[in-house]
Image: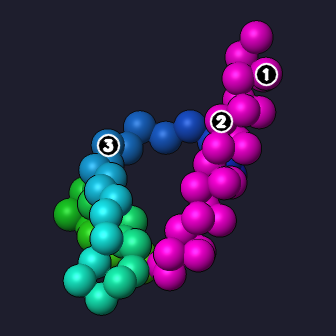
Amino acid sequence: MGINTERDIEANLQIGPTDQGFVRIFIEANGVEVPMDFSPEEADEIAEEIRAAAATARTVAK
């Protein structure tokens, strides 16, 4: 399995702040819940990685 391996799995994704000052990415799929908490700085780094991946994906799609 890898980033390019397609799967037919449906999942729900929620992202938001917690009452403890963290950013939570919450994934639910097939009855499994995965909460992941990040500091605001870590969340900024993740956001930058997502933006960079989106930019790369745009060039691949052309």
Q: Which residues are magenta?
A: 38-62
Could you tell me residue 54's position as x and y percent?
A: 65, 35
> Would you place residue 29 above or below residue 20 in this image?
above
Q: Identity of the amino acid at label 1?
A: Thr
In terms of depth relative to the viewer, which is nearer, 2 or 46? Answer: 46
- Identify residue type, mark 2: Ala
Picture disc at residue 59:
1
Magenta-drawn stretch contains 58: yes
Query: Residue 54 shows which numbered tag?
Result: 2
Name the element at disc 3. Answer: loop
Q: Which mark is nearer the camera, 2 or 3?
A: 2
Q: CA distance from mark 1 to mark 2?
A: 9 Å
Q: How is the image coloured?
A: rainbow
Residue drawn at the location 49% of the way across and 40% of the way down: 7
x, y (%) of residue 45? 65, 65
Which residue is painted at 59% across and 76% down in the image?
41
Residue where numbered disc 3 is placed: 10
